[in-house]
Image: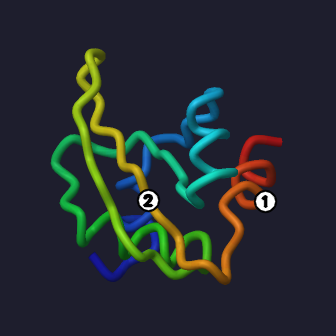
Amino acid sequence: MNSEAGVASIIVSVVATEKAYRLAEKQNYLVFKVRRDATKSKIKEAVEKLYNVKVVKINTAIDRDGYKKAYVRLSPEHNALDILERLTR
């Protein structure tokens, strides 16, 4: 999964709900919809390469629509809220 296209195909979209903004502001998390077959290590690699950040932790969940959501916690030197606002413009 070294190719840029392969890494980019893991992330389907950025979640920009009120909960996602609250997580970004209070706990430095970004929330993404990802492919169902994506593993935590692949998600970490994709986020670090695409957004040039350091990932500390990833939690995943399957939502009721069948998508996998990845809750990605960034290291303290990166501001998730700034990144989220830049991605949703």
Q: Point out the image quarter for the C terminus.
A: top right
Does 29 sit left or right of 72 as displayed? right
What mark, if any, has residue 67 been given in the picture? none
Work out how far the residue at label 2 is from the one at label 1, CA to CA, in angstroms. 15 Å
Mark 2 residue crowding within 10 angstroms, few (<14) / some (14–19) / many (20+): many
User: Tag 1 or tag 2, which sits nearer the N-term?
Assistant: 2
Q: Which residue is mark 2?
A: 72
The residue under the point 30% across, 16% down is 65
Q: For this rendering, which residue is in front, 64 or 7?
A: 64
SS category of the residue bearing label 1: helix
Total of numbered circles in the picture?
Answer: 2
The residue under the point 27% across, 68% down is 42
Image coords of residue 70 (percent x, y)? 36, 49
Image coords of residue 2 (percent x, y)? 33, 82
Residue extending farthest to the front is 26
Image coords of residue 14 (percent x, y)? 56, 42
Q: How is the image coloured?
A: rainbow
Mark 1 residue crowding within 10 angstroms, few (<14) / some (14–19) / many (20+): few
Does 77 sit left or right of 13 as displayed? right
Residue type marked 1: Asp
Residue type marked 2: Val
Image coords of residue 15 (percent x, y)? 55, 36
47 shown above or below 21: below
Does 11 sit left or right of 79 as displayed? left
Q: For this rendering, which residue is in front, 25 or 81?
A: 25
Q: Point out the image quarter for the N terminus.
A: bottom left
**Mark 1 and mark 2 in contact (Cβ < 8 Å)?**
no
The residue under the point 24% across, 38% down is 61
SS category of the residue bearing label 2: strand
Q: Which residue is mark 1?
A: 82
